[in-house]
Amino acid sequence: LKELDNGLLKIAFESDSLIRTCGYDATGLYPENRSVTSIEEKGIPEGFTANGEWMFDGEKIVPRIIPHEESVAKASERKAYCITVATNAINPLQDAVDLGIATDEEKRQLLLWKRYRVEVNRIDVTKAPDIEWPEQPA
């Protein structure tokens, strides 16, 4: 690790080239069963973090190509989460309407949240990652 003490960013990547950790101090990388290399500042892509979305192609850091199945799984999780958020917002608003005590603003919010939930529910997750997600009501 001494030879990597050169002031450059160090990346640790696995045999599948997936970058798992990075830092300027090689001693903090814990490179067991991983390869380590240094990257010059100009070779660090904008937005790079060791979050599982980047790979080392032997020369440079490149975005990881995410398999379609993984994109679909992530989209399914996001869809379920968005529907849960909408349902949690809708329930008390619907209660106010059902009880005849809803304000005009609560009625307006209820319609916005219901429309959002329907739009999210209509999303075809098999089209991931090319999905236009509706904007959540404020």
Image: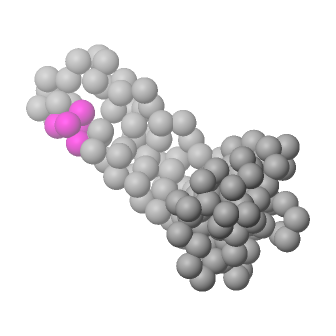
Above or below, 120 relative to 75: above
Q: Toward the viewer: 95 or 4?
A: 4
* Residue 18, horizontal then vertical, whole percent: 68, 71
The answer to whether residue 37 is magenta is: no
Asked if residue 17 shows in the view, the reply is yes
* Residue 12, horizontal then vertical, whole percent: 65, 67
Asked if residue 71 shows in the view, the reply is no
Q: Toward the viewer: 115 or 51?
A: 51
| Magenta-highlighted residues | 91-95
User: Residue reaching furthest right?
Assistant: 59
Which residue occupies 31% across, 47% down? Answer: 87
Identify the image quadrant of residue 25. bottom right
* Residue 5, horizontal then vertical, whole percent: 69, 55
* Residue 59, horizontal then vertical, whole percent: 88, 65
Which residue occupies 52% across, 47% down? Answer: 119
Q: Quadrant of the C terminus?
A: top left
Count of number-bearing discs = 0
Which residue occupies 11% across, 32% down? Answer: 99
Q: Quadrant of the N terminus?
A: bottom right
